[in-house]
Amino acid sequence: MNELQKVYDVLVQLYSSKGYKAGEYTIKAESPSVSHISRGQDGEMEIDFIDNAPVVKVKKIITIRITVLGIVLKKDGGIIKLNRFPDISFQYDKLPTIPSEYFEQPELPETD
């Protein structure tokens, strides 16, 4: 899977009603937002959120909502960069094909 396809798949899931699942964490974003996508020094893809950043919910004893500053997508996994908290590393074999339920289907008007 090429790097741009990987970024696209993550972003589609991130802005879906289900969010993007990275290990035990789910990240959700609201539209519209502003982000910067670039290639890092080691070939990883970096998504930095500038405005209306997504949040990750961390549930331990209580649930905490933390602002996501960015996501780094590497060959075998990635890093979720968090505001005022340690970054979260996650692994994936490869990103799955995006299931159709991630795409909102527009309601079509009834015709007689």
Image (cartoon, helix red, strand yellow):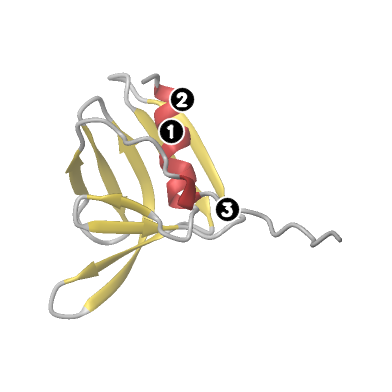
Secondary structure of the residue carrying tag 1 is helix
| Rendered image quadrant of residue 58 | bottom left
Q: Amino acid at mark 3?
A: Ser
In the rendered structure, the answer to whether residue 42 lies left or right of residue 104 reads left
Which residue is found at the position 38% from the left and 51% from the top?
69
Of the pair 108 and 38, the residue shown nearer to us = 108
Q: Quadrant of residue 48?
A: top left
Q: Residue at x 19, y 43 (%)?
A: 90
Answer few, some or many: residues within 10 Å of disc 3's Cα (few below 14, many 20 plus, some between 14 and 19): few
On screen, residue 111 versus residue 22, left or right, reads right
**Pointer 2: residues within 10 angstroms few (<14), some, or many (20+)?**
few
Q: Residues within 10 Å of mark 1 (few under 14, many from 20)?
A: some
Number of the label disc, if any, that sits on residue 93: none
Q: Which residue is mark 1?
A: 7
User: What residue lies at 26% left-to-right and 30% top-to-bottom?
Assistant: 94
Decide: is 11 above or below 85: above
Horizontal side, residue 85 vs residue 72: left or right? left
Percent x, y of residue 78? 25, 37
Query: Quick one: label 3 or label 2, which is nearer the N terminus?
Result: 2
Numbered label attached to residue 4? 2
Which quadrant holds residue 41?
Answer: top left
Q: Which SS class for mark 3?
A: loop
Q: Where is mark 3, residue-wise?
A: 33
What's the amino acid at mark 2?
Leu
